[in-house]
Image (spheres, helix red, strand yellow):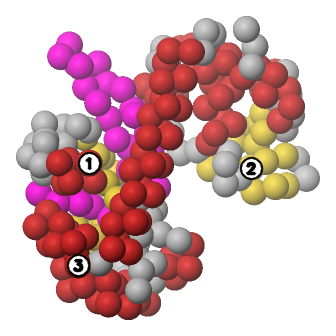
Amino acid sequence: MRGPYGLELVEDCKACHMRQDGFFCQLPCAAVEKLNSAKFTSAHPAGAVLFVEGQLPKGVYMLCKGRVKLTMNSADGKTLIVRIGEPGEILGLHATLSGDPYELTAEALQPCQVNFVRRDDFLRMLREHPEASAAVVRQVSDGYRMACREIRYLGLSRSASEKVAQFLLESATHAQATGQGKRFHLGLTHEEISQMVGISRETVTRTLSEFKNKMLIATKGSTVVIRNESGLRAQAAAA
C-alpha cells in the first residue's frame, strides 16, 4: 500500500521482496505468520526518533526501508554515531533481549518503514521458533563485527587520512562497479562522518578534498566514486 513520505508500505512479510536477501523475515512460514500477527507497521519521516538512549525497551524495530543513524551521547553533550542501520536490521535488539535500557538513540536519516514488535511478543516468538533465534544470533554477530570496526576507527587509526579512507572503503561494500570506479550513495554530512570516525568536521572536509585532489575519489552531492581503490587502501594502511 502507498504510505506517507513517498514510501510503498509492505505490511505482509510473506509478500516482501527483501525475503530473498536473507533478512530476518526470511523464516519458515509458521514463524513468518507469527511475525505478521505480532508486528505493527509504520512509516517515519527523516529526523524521526524511534527510541532514545536510556529508555526502557518496549521492543524491537525491524527496519524494512530507509536508513537510521544510531548514536551515543556523552554527559557533556558530544555525539558519536556508532553506525548506520540498513534495511533488514533489527534495532534495539540487545536491550530487548536483556531488559536493560536502550544503549543508543535511533534517528531516521531518510523516510523509513519500520515493523515494531513488542518485547513480550518478540521473546515468545524466539522461544517458539528456533529459526528466529538463529537469525538473532546472526544479528548479534554482525553487531560485534561493527563494534570492532568502530574501535578501529577511534583507537587504532593514527591519522585522519587512515580514518576517512577506512570509512570510505567500508561504506563501499555494496557499491556499484562503473567505468569510473566504485559508485555508492553515502548520504551523510561531513559532521555526521566526523561523529563516526572521531575527528573534527573541518578535518573530514579537508581530508576528502585531499583525496579528490589526488584523484582517489570523486563526489557529486551524496554520491561517491572510488576512482583509485588501491591508492585509497594505501591511505587506509598508512602508518
Q: Tag on residue 170?
A: none
Span colored in magenta: 58-86
The residue nearer to you, when weighing 40 against 187, is 40
Disc 1 marks a residue whose amino acid type is His
Q: Does the magenta portion include 65?
A: yes
Q: Is mark 1 on a helix, strand or loop?
A: helix
Nearer the camera: disc 3 or disc 2: 3
Q: Which residue is drawn at 20% across and 13% down?
A: 76
In the rendered structure, the answer to whether residue 56 lies left or right of residue 31 reads left
Q: Tag on residue 128?
A: 3
Tag 3 near tag 2, CB within 8 Å? no
The residue nearer to you, when weighing 21 against 108, is 21
Disc 3 marks a residue whose amino acid type is Glu
In the rendered structure, the answer to whether residue 206 lies left or right of residue 107 reads right
Q: Earlier in the sequence, mark 3 or mark 2?
A: 3
Q: How crowded is mark 3: few (under 14 residues within 10 Å), some or many (20 or more)?
A: few
List the residue tagged with mark 2: 183
Q: What element carries label 3?
A: helix
Q: Residue at x 56, y 15 (%)?
A: 156
Can you see residue 1?
Answer: no
Q: Quadrant of residue 34?
A: bottom left
Q: Residue at x 61, y 21 (%)?
A: 163
List the residue tagged with mark 1: 94
Can you see residue 157?
Answer: yes
Nearer the camera: disc 3 or disc 1: 3
Q: Earlier in the sequence, mark 3 or mark 1?
A: 1
